[in-house]
Amino acid sequence: MLKGFRAFIMKGNVVDLAVAVVIGAAFGAVVTTLVNSVLMPLMAKILGVVNFDNFLAWDDVRFGVLLTAVVNFVLIAASIYFVVVVPMNLMIARRDAKLGIKEAGPDVDPHIELLTEIRDSLRSRAQ
């Protein structure tokens, strides 16, 4: 029973997932700080409000809280995209160009590929 547990823990995908969760939690703190300390104050200077919690409030129903959550989500998603995803894609593209790695095309059914070769061969003979 312990051998099976050890084999499960030592699988690459389990370890990768554990590392991703820990790194994700740590990175979440960085992104939250970016949004709360940089982006929201900039928005407050531009729009004049720090949050929208009291916007469209009606008795106990506060649509502004939802609006604040949506704005936070958009800011977090944009900051992750522009600070992490875009630079990472550029680094991968540069690395692939340096190593001569080309993007793989879509997988083609071998039968279709064979028929295409036959068609092209017949066309070249007809000319």
Image (tube, rainbow, N blue to C red):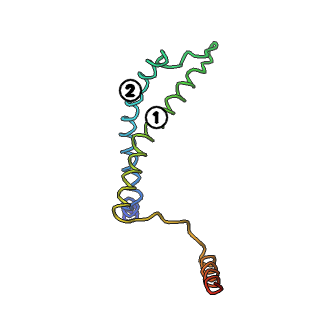
Amino acid, disc 1: Ile
The part of the image, by quadrant, that contains residue 36 is top left
Q: Nearer the viewer, residue 39 or 116?
A: 116
Query: Quick one: which residue is furthest to the bottom in this view?
Result: 125
* Label 1: which secondary element: helix
The quarter of the rendered structure image containing the N terminus is bottom left
Query: Quick one: which residue is furthest to the front in this view?
Result: 127
Please state if 88 lies on the left or on the right of 54 as rendered: left
Q: Residue at x 39, y 40 (%)?
A: 83
Residue wearing tag 1: 76
Q: Nearer the viewer, residue 61 or 110?
A: 110
Please rate how many residues cluster around mark 2, counting C-alpha atoms within 10 Å: few if below 14, some from 14 to 19, many from 20: few
Q: Is residue 95 above or below residue 42?
A: below
The part of the image, by quadrant, that contains residue 125 is bottom right
Q: Residue at x 38, y 31 (%)?
A: 34
Q: Are marks 1 and 2 in contact (CB under 8 Å)?
A: no
Separation (CA) of disc 1 from disc 2:
11 Å
The part of the image, by quadrant, that contains residue 79 is top left
Q: Position of residue 93 (x, y in %)?
A: 40, 56
Q: Nearer the viewer, residue 99 or 24?
A: 99
Q: Is residue 116 above or below residue 8?
A: below
Q: Residue at x 52, y 28 (%)?
A: 71
The quarter of the rendered structure image containing the C terminus is bottom right
State the mark number for residue 88: none
* Label 2: which secondary element: helix
Looking at the image, is mark 1 or mark 2 earlier in the sequence?
Answer: 2
Q: Position of residue 25 (x, y in %)?
A: 39, 40
Please state if 62 lies on the left or on the right of 2 as rendered: right
Q: Position of residue 105 (x, y in %)?
A: 52, 66
Please rate how many residues cluster around mark 1, counting C-alpha atoms within 10 Å: few if below 14, some from 14 to 19, many from 20: some
Q: Residue at x 60, y 74 (%)?
A: 109
Residue wearing tag 2: 38
